[in-house]
Image (cartoon, rainbow, N blue to C red):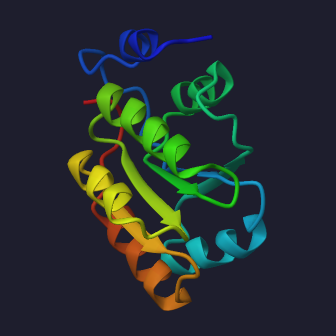
Amino acid sequence: MKSIENLTKIYSPDLPSISNNKKILVIADEMGSFLEKLIKKANNNFQISFCKPYSRTSLLYTEILENKYNLIILTNNCLLRDQIFEISKDIKMAIPKLKILVLNGDNNPEFLKNLETLKIDGYLPLPFKQDLFIKKVHDLTNNIWFGIN
């Protein structure tokens, strides 16, 4: 299993920019086609990939590393609150500029405060209003960082 240290070494900010591809990864078990339609309404210029939740396994981190995503969308229909926090923390520690949007039905104040301390780029409570999701994705993808620099 890759640790966060290995993730950081592989995805070093000192490396030159590898790709200007526009990619979004949605980590979800369900809601795939529904979210894909909404993401395309927000910004049709991005390739959208879906990944089953693997918790904090090497498979999840390999997916993120190998594909150089610009935005990760985490949902709680497949991950527990603590898993969302830990995955977000790992990603932000290793790749601070990678944008993360969390969709979560648990509006626990402590969880929201923890996400804020991680400087998560966006949060929407579930169930969300479609127009709010489209606006949030639009905002996050129109001011996006490309590559590794």
Residue 130 vs residue 69, the one in the foreground: 130
Q: Please tell me which residue is depicted at 45% across the width and 9% down the height of the picture.
A: 6
* Rendering coords of residue 26 (x, y %): 61, 54
Residue 95 vs residue 141, the one in the foreground: 95
Q: Please tell me which residue is depicted at 74% across the width and 64% down the height of the picture.
A: 32
Vertical placement of residue 26 versus 4, above or below? below
Quarter holding residue 63: top right
Q: Is residue 56 left or right of residue 11?
A: right
Residue 24 vs residue 133, the one in the foreground: 133
Vertical placement of residue 95 versus 97, above or below? above
Vertical placement of residue 49 versus 69, above or below? below
Q: Quadrant of the N terminus?
A: top right
Q: Is residue 86 left or right of residue 2?
A: left
Q: In which quarter of the image is the C terminus?
A: top left
Q: Please tell me which residue is depicted at 32% across the width and 16% down the height of the picture.
A: 12
Vertical placement of residue 25 versus 108, above or below? above
